[in-house]
Image (cartoon, rainbow, N blue to C red):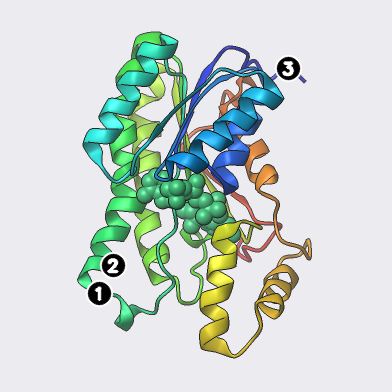
Amino acid sequence: MDLGLKNRVALVAASSQGIGLATAEAFAAEGCRVAMCARNSDRLHAAADKIRKEQGAEVFVDAFDVSDPAAVTRFVADVVTKFGSLDICVTNAGGPPPKGFLACTQEDWQRALELNFLSTVYFAREVIPHMQRRRWGRIITITSITTKQPVADLVLSNAVRTAVVGLVRSLANEFGKDGILANNVGPGFTATERLKELARARAASSGKTEQQLFDSWAADAPLKRLGDPREVAETIVWLASDRASYLTGQTVLVDGGLYKGL
Ligand SMILES: NC(=O)c1ccc[n+]([C@@H]2O[C@H](COP(=O)([O-])OP(=O)(O)OC[C@H]3O[C@@H](n4cnc5c(N)ncnc54)[C@H](OP(=O)(O)O)[C@@H]3O)[C@@H](O)[C@H]2O)c1
């Protein structure tokens, strides 16, 4: 199936590993030119080199923190200068620390807002004018199943990520007339470094081993396994494609059926 993505420019934030990296790889495999960022420069450059080598794709990278609005502004401008356009923007960032409500400090809330909500605002406001000019664009936010179903000890994620859903719906409403589609993707338990971090933290407080935690997360999903980052990435690529041309303002969970609501 031709997804119509050849030569599109796809920016994928926070993409040196995990779901972000799998998404950058999947866009490159569809013939996109790809822009990637993350904080750790060595890991980011290694990830970009791997994509160039394996896919023969053009890749542009810059190392910065997505919660820095000036850095996001500079990056988007540099991507447009380098590639001449910007068609697809996938927002992503690291997850907030696992904590219960009373353990969260003022700094935790501030950081979670900046990292998991405001960073999305920073990217959206920079990329939308470019997409409006070409009357075509895709904004896809990576959040979490927590936008539909809270997860224990992840109050920062449960609370802050729902603001992203409100933003995505608002962008879909306001910019649909310009050919810009905005959707949100919520992963369930997906086998990445982030999940290992969660398992380490939960193991320390629960008395269970990390393996027992992985097993119980897998057992909770009707598909009885953890997700692979590539499965989230393939959904994002499809949402960005011409094959999903009448779909906007939605949250799509890639969670193996973990969300129990209707
Ligand atoms: N894995 C899951 O089960 C799961 C489930 C639901 C939701 N999620 C969410 O999905 C997102 C991606 O998760 P993942 O599992 O792929 O995580 P991951 O494996 O830990 O990868 C996170 C990526 O984001 C980059 N990053 C982190 N903080 C950043 C920042 N402030 N600025 C720029 N780049 C940053 C990291 O590189 P640097 O550290 O070098 O910056 C890395 O490339 C997270 O928000 C996570 O909470 C994950």
Quarter of the image holding residue 171? Answer: top left
Badge 2 amino acid: Asp
Disc 1: which residue:
105
User: Where's residue 45, x and y in %?
Assistant: 51, 34
Q: Distance between the residues labelled 3 and 1?
A: 48 Å
Asked whether mark 1 lies closer than 8 Å to ligand 1, one says no
Decide if residue 52 is on the left or right side of residue 90: right
Badge 1 amino acid: Thr
| Viewer-nearest of discs 3 and 2 | 2
Q: Looking at this rendering, what residue extends furthest in the front direction? A: 42
Identify the residue at horizontal 66%, vertical 83% (top origin). 209
User: Where's residue 1, x and y in %?
Assistant: 77, 20
- Checking the image for residue 108, the label placed there is 2
| Viewer-nearest of discs 3 and 1 | 1
**Residue 114 position (above or below residue 106):** above
Q: Distance between the residues labelled 2 and 1?
A: 5 Å
**Residue 260 position (above or below residue 247):** below
